Amino acid sequence: MGVHTTVVFTDLFGSTRVFEALGNAKATQAVMQVTTWIAKIVEAHGGRVVKMLGDGVLALFDDSASAINAVVEMQRLHQKRMTHVVPSQRMPIRVGVASGDVEIVAGDCYGDAVNIAARLSDLSGAHQIWANSAALDTATEADGVRFRILGPISIRGRAEPCTVYQIDWQEDVASDFLTMQAEMDPQFDVTQTDALGGQIELSWLDTRKTFQSFEMPIHIGRMHQAEFVVNDPRVSRTHARIDWRNGSVMLVDLSSYGCWVRFSGGGADLLLRREECALHGHGEIALGTSFADLSAPTVHFSVA
C-alpha cells in the first residue's frame, strides 16, 4: 500500500578517486565510516535507513521538516569533519530529497519520490542539497538555511518536469544571493523549459546524437550498451563518460590509453588519462590515440 513520505538519497562524491588512492580495503573502510555516520544522523532525526547502496544511503522520513533538518546538519557537520582529512581522500556528500507516495515492499521502497530523490542526488554537486517542491511544503528557512529555486528540471523516465530547489545551508554565505525567490510566475510554463538547459551533440562518421542535461551521464565506448558507440579497436569498451555537473558538461576519461581534446579556436591539445575536463563550445575528442594519428577515432562535440 502506498504511503506519503519524504525520501532522502545521499551519495559520496569522489569515492572512485579514494578507491584509486587507498586501494579497495582501506577505501571500503573509509566509505563505510561515512555512510554509517550518515545513518546515525538520519536516525537521530527520526528517519529510517532503508538500505546502504555502496557509497549511498537511502532513507525515509515521516515528515519533510525532519528530513531537511537532518540533511542540513549532515552537510554542516561533514564539512567540519573533512577538515581533518587530506584533500585527496575527501568525499563530500551530495543529497537529493523528494516527498511523495512510495510503495513499501519487503522492507524496500519504490515509487516516483524514490526515483526523483536518487536523480536529484546525481544531478547535484558536492556539498549540495536538491529537493523537489513538495519536500519544502512544511519546512522553514531558519538558522542560515535558504531555499533557492532552480526551476523546472526534467527527470529521466518521468513525463513531466518537477520544480526543484537548492537548499543552501552554509551559514557564512552572503544572504542576498540565497534569498528565496517569490512564487513562480503562473505564465512560466514548466513543460516548455528545463532549468538545467544544457546539451551536447556528438558525431562520429555518420552517427550523430544529441543528449540533454537530464540524460547524463552518458558513456562513449566500443560496447553496444554505450549511449554513444564508437566501434574502433583502439576504443575501450567503456572509454569515457560525459557528466552534467554544476552547470557544466564534463568529459571523464575511463580508458587505458586516454582521450585527447582539441577545442575550436586554437590552444594546445589536452590529454586526459583517468582525468576530466569541462567541455565548451565546439571541438574534437580523439579516443585511444592522439590527433597525430590521422586515422584516430575522433568524435566531434558541440556544447550548447
Image (tube, rainbow, N blue to C red):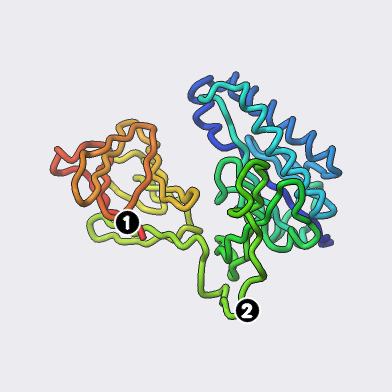
**Residue plotted at (62% across, 65% down):** 162
Front-most of residues 68 and 146: 146
Mark 1 lies on residue: 202
Q: Which mark is residue 167?
A: none
Helix, strand or loop at mark 2: loop
Residue 186 in the image, given as x and y percentages of width and height: 62, 79
Query: Does the CB distance between marks 1 and 2 fall below 8 Å?
Result: no
The picture quadrant where one finds residue 83 is top right
Residue 267: x %, y % from top left: 21, 42
User: Which part of the image, by quadrant, shows the N terminus?
Assistant: bottom right
> What numbered label is drawn on residue 186?
2
Three-letter amino acid code at the position of disc 1: Leu
Mark 1 is surrounded, within 10 Å at the Cα level, by few (under 14), some (14 to 19) or many (20 or more) other residues, namely: some
Q: Earlier in the sequence, mark 1 or mark 2?
A: 2
Residue at the image position 55 percent from the left and 64 percent from the top: 154
Q: Residue furthest bottom?
A: 187
x, y percent for residue 5: 80, 57
Decide: few, some or many residues near mark 2? Use Cα within 10 Å; few <14, some 14-19, many ≥20. few
User: Where the C terminus falls, by quadrant?
Assistant: bottom left
Q: In this view of the protein, which residue sits in the foreground, 38 or 58?
A: 38
**Nearer-the-camera pick, 114 or 152:** 152
Separation of marks 1 and 2 at Cα, in angstroms? 36 Å
Could you tell me how many numbered marks the image carries?
Answer: 2
Tell whether 275 sits left or right of 183: left
Residue 77 drawn above or below residue 204: above
Q: Nearer the viewer, residue 112 or 12?
A: 12
Residue 54: x percent and y percent?
64, 35
Residue 225 seen by the camera: no
